[in-house]
Amino acid sequence: MSQRAGGFGTARAQVRAVSPAPPQLQLSLLLVDDDTRTVRRLAQLLRDDGFDVHTAADLRTARALASTIPVDVALMDVRLPDGDGRALASELLAASSSLRVIFITIYPELFAPTDPGTRCSSLTKPVDYAKLVAVLHALDDERQLHLAAAP
């Protein structure tokens, strides 16, 4: 993701011009990737757009964070220094029935097209920021509907 860090700003301006983000979505994101420069940039853009973002550069840190904070969406790379992000996704999905996982990867061939009922999807690097934000807005809308319908 490192070479794409600079491209997020232009896409972000386009996203805001089309549909401004609500002041605070309060969707809690766990961003897991070992490219620290890109993680910092993407995390800042997402925070500026109203998301609650927590970051980890490896599976160990991601597990520790996920055990102490509520996470609505995990954005994660597949190949990490201490293992495979898919293994962590399986653990997180087993622990939370409401969690969604979006893999951000240069290996799209590892993923089949997403079925509507699944809780995992993938985006290919370089990340299209406008598409990412649109997906996150849709997930937040779904979460809000679920919360409103809960007794």
Image: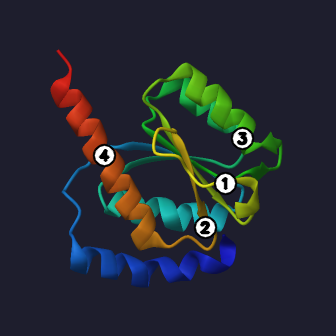
**Which numbered tag is attached to residue 33?**
1
Instruction: Tell me the distance, in whole angstroms, between the alpha carbons under discs 2 and 3.
Output: 20 Å
Which quadrant of the figure contains the N terminus? bottom right
Badge 4: few (under 14), some or many (20 or more) residues near its Cα, within 10 Å?
Answer: some
Instruction: Tell me the distance, in whole angstroms, between the alpha carbons under discs 1 and 4.
Output: 22 Å
Mark 1 or 4 closer to N-term? Answer: 1
Q: Is residue 61 above or below residue 23?
A: above
Which quadrant of the figure contains the C terminus? top left
Circles 2 and 4, Cβ within 8 Å, touching? The answer is: no
**Which numbered tag is attached to residue 140?**
4
Give the residue pinned by disc 3: 86
Position of 57 with respect to 84 (left or right) is left
Q: Nearer the viewer, mark 1 or mark 4?
A: 4
Image location of residue 107, percent across then percent down:
75, 62
Q: Is residue 151 visible?
A: yes
Instruction: Tell me the distance, in whole angstroms, between the alpha carbons under discs 3 and 1.
Output: 13 Å
Look at label 2 and name its amino acid. Answer: Thr
Quarter occupied by residue 120? top right
Q: Nearer the viewer, mark 2 or mark 4?
A: 4
Give the residue pinned by disc 2: 38
Front position in the image: 40 or 74: 74
Front position in the image: 135 or 83: 135
Position of 127 with respect to 1 (left or right) is left
Position of 141 with respect to 30 (left or right) is left
Instruction: Tell me the distance, in whole angstroms, between the alpha carbons under discs 3 and 4.
Output: 23 Å
